[in-house]
Image (cartoon, rainbow, N blue to C red):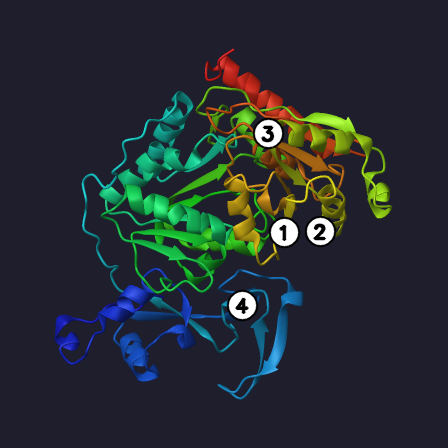
């Protein structure tokens, strides 16, 4: 139960610190995370400004911060604070240790008020017809504190679809969060949103961020950082809801729910919703709006399936299948840049060694590559003709004029979602609205067939709605 705020007469004998309010409003933090003395924290609690929540519950066994109930995530340790042997949660340990005698501290008083700006959005861009429909639905969800799925094909311009809804929320004093599973997406979104909402305080929240203690009306956050929030946001927008690790981590899904206010809007964005959600959208059981076409009104490139034999066995022998070799040589001959996806780093490195004998400037990149950003920039600048990659570049990369290939598309790492996203790298710009997408395989999989079917269905819907020029 949240304690009542003190009366004015009581406040006269208490030195209230507004910095504590700014840091803790809408948050749940460990005492060790707070840059204040234990005595000052205790005084604010005793005067009703702070609330403590038990970190670990034994019956039923639950971590309050991350919602974990799996016993395998709990371990014992001798606690120096209370002198007992206690349970702590290993699932969210990277955010600081939560144990049985560790309280999570939250603000119990009134939230800081934001200055209401009538027209916070400063943007002169134009939305496509598909974007306009989706934008109106986002505004409706914000107004009605509703849940909405925006199912938009890769390259449809999901971010711009959010502008009007975010502006409506900000103009009415609401607090908004745009969450995404990946730090690099946060770093990409922050400057874009600061440009179109120049008078709004925006905080970028990710591991190591210097803004993690700031109280902002608009937060751009990784889903991991939402574990620090509690009933904070009036509008929660989750981008790339299908992406790893959010799609498989119940803790992150719990964090999204816990960081929302009881009456709030929840908007999901994705190009590849899971099958159950697709069925619910098509049957009308889920509130959903689709953008089946890109702004340039050209259809999505449909993948071509090419059997390439036991490509992995050939790589071990230092050879390349004829089909793959011809595809690469055709791109090099015409000067067409290409992204080639491989299922494993080891396979990619063997492939790189072979392809460099054909053209030395060819490069490769993966998640642990220290030169990853530099190589992607060189690829953007056309200094690299072909870039080999793992699934790390399946999202968030827009190169105007490229073809795309997947080698070993039968590998289980290439899920339906991953293959749709990979295919979405081609044909994204208006000037180069077409592109070749080829899945080289040693046997077709359900994921390959489903990905191709989803792309074909979206193209048909785009034509039916008059969003694609025939």
Labels in figure, total: 4
**Which residue is drawn at the image coordinates 53% and 29% (left, top)?**
281
Tell me the residue that label 3 is attached to: 279
Tell me the residue that label 2 is attached to: 345
Disc on the earlier residue, 1 or 4: 4
Residue 106 percent coordinates (x, y): 36, 67
Residue 232 percent coordinates (x, y): 36, 55
Asked if residue 231 can be seen in this view, the reply is no
Q: Circles 1 and 2: CB distance less than 8 Å?
A: yes
Tell me the residue that label 1 is attached to: 366
Residue 367 percent coordinates (x, y): 61, 54
Q: Which mark is residue 444?
A: none
Q: Residues within 10 Å of mark 1 (few under 14, many from 20)?
A: some
Q: Find the residue positioned furthest to the top.
A: 470
Asked if residue 102 can be seen in this view, the reply is yes
Tell me the residue that label 4 is attached to: 94
Q: CA distance from mark 1 to mark 4?
A: 24 Å
**Which residue is drawn at the image coordinates 57% and 55% (left, top)?**
371
Q: Residues within 10 Å of mark 3 (few under 14, many from 20)?
A: few
- Of 261 and 435, nearer the camera is 435
Q: CA distance from mark 2 to mark 4?
A: 27 Å
- Residue 38's image quarter? bottom left
């Amino acid at each position: 139960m949240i304690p009542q705020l003190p009366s004015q007469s009581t406040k006269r004998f208490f030195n209230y610190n507004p910095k504590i309010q700014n840091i803790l409003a809408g948050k749940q933090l460990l005492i060790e995370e707070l840059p204040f003395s234990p005595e000052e924290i205790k005084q604010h609690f005793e005067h009703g400004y702070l609330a403590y929540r038990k970190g670990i519950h034994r019956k039923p066994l639950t971590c309050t911060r991350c919602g974990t109930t799996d016993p395998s995530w709990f371990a014992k340790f001798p606690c120096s604070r209370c002198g007992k042997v206690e349970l702590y949660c290993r699932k969210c340990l990277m955010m600081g240790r939560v144990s049985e005698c560790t309280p999570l501290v939250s603000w119990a008083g009134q939230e800081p008020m934001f200055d209401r700006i009538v027209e916070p959005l400063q943007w002169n861009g134009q939305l496509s017809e598909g974007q306009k429909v989706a934008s109106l639905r986002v505004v409706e969800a914000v107004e009605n504190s509703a849940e909405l799925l925006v199912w938009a094909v890769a390259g449809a311009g999901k971010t711009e679809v959010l502008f009007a809804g975010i502006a409506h929320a900000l103009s009415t004093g609401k607090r908004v969060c745009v969450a995404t599973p990946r730090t690099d997406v946060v770093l990409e979104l922050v400057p874009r949103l600061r440009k179109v909402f120049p008078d709004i305080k925006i905080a970028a929240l990710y591991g190591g961020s210097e803004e993690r203690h700031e109280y902002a009306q608009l937060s751009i956050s990784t889903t991991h950082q939402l574990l620090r929030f509690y009933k904070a946001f009036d509008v929660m927008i989750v981008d790339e809801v299908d992406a790893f690790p959010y799609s498989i981590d119940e803790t992150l899904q719990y964090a999204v729910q816990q960081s929302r206010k009881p009456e709030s809007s929840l908007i999901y964005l994705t190009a590849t919703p899971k099958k159950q959600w697709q069925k619910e959208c098509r049957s009308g059981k889920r509130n959903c709006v689709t953008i089946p076409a890109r702004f340039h009104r050209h259809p999505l490139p449909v993948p071509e399936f090419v059997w390439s034999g036991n490509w992995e066995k050939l790589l071990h022998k230092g050879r390349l299948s004829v089909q793959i070799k011809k595809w690469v040589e055709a791109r090099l001959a015409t000067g067409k840049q290409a992204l080639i996806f491989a299922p494993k780093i080891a396979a990619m490195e063997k492939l790189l060694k072979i392809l460099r004998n054909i053209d030395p400037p060819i490069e490769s990149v993966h998640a642990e590559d220290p030169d990853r950003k530099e190589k992607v920039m060189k690829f953007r600048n056309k200094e690299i003709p072909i870039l080999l990659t793992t699934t790390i570049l399946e999202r968030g990369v827009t190169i105007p004029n490229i073809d795309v290939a997947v080698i070993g598309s039968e590998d289980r790492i290439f899920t339906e979602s991953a293959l749709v996203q990979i295919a979405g790298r081609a044909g994204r710009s208006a000037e180069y609205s077409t592109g070749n997408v080829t899945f080289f395989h040693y046997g077709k999989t359900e994921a390959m067939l489903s990905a191709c079917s989803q792309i074909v269905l979206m193209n048909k819907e785009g034509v039916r709605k008059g969003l694609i020029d025939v």
